[in-house]
């Protein structure tokens, strides 16, 4: 991980003028990190009280979104998922033709389709930082929330490739991010099991507790496994519902696999099959161990900075699909140089 937010890391981005539209937990944390790193940043939120909070934390927050994004080089678009496709063209028009646009929504296909409909694919880079908390709002935001996070960006060929490179470099420098290049559909498939289904499971466990015969006794005995397993059930319900409905088909598909595995466990328990139950937990434990014990190999690739970038984008998507991420991106001397970290090798 790069040293996020240091003077050396952000030296190449010191003159960037950024805006964050939608300053909830994620947008607000991005806002505070950008300000802490010394960038010129403005904020806008539809809630007047939230705009007042931003001003109270030292960030300019104009009354209109048009004023907040005018003349900006980069706009991060947050806010409730259902609002993103509609507000994207409005923000793009107010921000000017050369402004790079990205979002932080937890689903990608719908907003990517909206960008295509409005002819914005040359400067819109769909994004999703994989971090968060059960709290909400700018009051809960902290500049360190996204440090070192896996941050999905969706690279596109042609004119869209240059904004992807530039934004990748900024996220690496300012946030120490692990940039994961994926298509919008690949993101939604992976996020369904990595993020969205866990909200269903947490809700089911917490909800079942309330319906059991002795909920107070359960809560008194609840230790780490229960607290970890139900943490995201405390996420504001509207935010969770928007996320689940925004990726409904993928979530239901992955939930079926979870239900099948749970039924395997239950059947082994019903039959007292110690060997089968142990094997299932060994399999699950091996996967869980990979979260902290997975080995990576560095792979360096270079491409021409001009052209249609088809090979470059294809390789980037292979990196993400293989579970890898970008640790460096440098554009210089007519070329672009990436350092990818891969849990296994991707073909040349």
Image (cartoon, grey):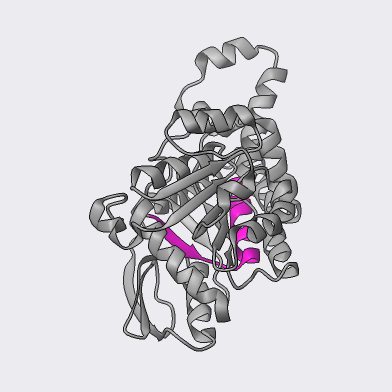
The stretch in magenta equals: 177-195
Horizontal and vertical percent position of residue 258: 65, 48
**Res 194 visible:** no
Q: Quadrant of the N terminus?
A: bottom left
Along the viewing direction, whichever of 196 and 329 lies nearer the viewer:
329
Along the viewing direction, whichever of 305 and 303 lies nearer the viewer:
305
| Residue at figure coordinates x 75%, y 46% from the top left | 245
Along the viewing direction, whichever of 287 and 73 lies nearer the viewer:
73
**Res 12 visible:** yes
Q: Residue furthest left?
A: 8
Horizontal and vertical percent position of residue 288: 45, 48
**Magenta-highlighted stretch: main secondary structure?**
helix
**Does residue 44 sit above or below 134 in this rendering?**
below
In the displayed structure, does residue 78 sit left or right of residue 284?
Answer: right
**Does residue 119 sit above or below 76 in this rendering?**
below
Horizontal and vertical percent position of residue 315: 48, 79
Check if residue 33 falls in the magenta segment. Answer: no
| Residue at figure coordinates x 70%, y 55% from the top left | 90
| Residue at figure coordinates x 71%, y 69% from the top left | 116
In the displayed structure, does residue 273 sit left or right of residue 324?
Answer: right
Along the viewing direction, whichever of 74 and 233 lies nearer the viewer:
74
Check if residue 186 falls in the magenta segment. Answer: yes
């Amino acid at each position: 991980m790069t040293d996020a937010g240091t003077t050396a890391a952000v030296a190449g981005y010191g003159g960037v003028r950024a805006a964050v539209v939608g300053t909830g937990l994620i947008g607000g944390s991005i806002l505070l990190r950008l300000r802490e790193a010394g960038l010129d940043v403005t904020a806008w939120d539809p809630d007047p009280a939230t705009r007042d909070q931003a001003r109270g934390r030292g960030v300019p927050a104009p009354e209109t979104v048009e004023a907040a994004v005018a003349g900006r080089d980069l706009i991060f678009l947050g806010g409730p998922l259902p609002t993103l496709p509609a507000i994207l063209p409005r923000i793009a028009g107010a921000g000017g033709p050369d402004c790079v646009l990205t979002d932080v929504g937890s689903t990608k296909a719908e907003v990517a389709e909206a960008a295509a409909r409005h002819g914005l694919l040359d400067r819109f880079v769909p994004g999703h930082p994989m971090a968060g908390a059960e709290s909400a709002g700018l009051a809960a935001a902290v500049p360190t929330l996204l440090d070192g996070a896996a941050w999905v960006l969706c690279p596109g060929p042609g004119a869209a490739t240059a904004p992807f490179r530039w934004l990748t470099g900024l996220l690496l420098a300012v946030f120490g991010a692990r940039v994961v290049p994926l298509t919008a559909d690949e993101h939604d498939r992976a996020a369904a099991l990595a993020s969205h289904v866990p909200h269903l499971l947490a809700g089911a466990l917490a909800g079942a507790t309330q319906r059991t015969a002795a909920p107070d006794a359960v809560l008194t005995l609840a230790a780490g496994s229960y607290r970890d397993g139900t943490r995201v059930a405390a996420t504001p319900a509207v935010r969770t519902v928007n996320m689940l409905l925004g990726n409904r088909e993928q979530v239901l598909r992955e939930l079926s696999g979870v239900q099948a595995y749970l039924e395997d466990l239950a059947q082994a328990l019903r039959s007292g099959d110690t060997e089968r139950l142990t094997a299932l937990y060994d399999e699950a434990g091996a996967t869980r161990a990979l979260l902290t014990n997975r080995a990576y190999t560095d792979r360096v690739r270079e491409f021409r900075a001009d052209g249609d970038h088809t090979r470059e984008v294809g390789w980037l998507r292979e990196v993400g699909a293989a579970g890898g991420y970008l640790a460096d991106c440098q554009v210089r001397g007519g070329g672009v140089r990436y350092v990818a970290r891969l849990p296994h090798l991707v073909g040349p």
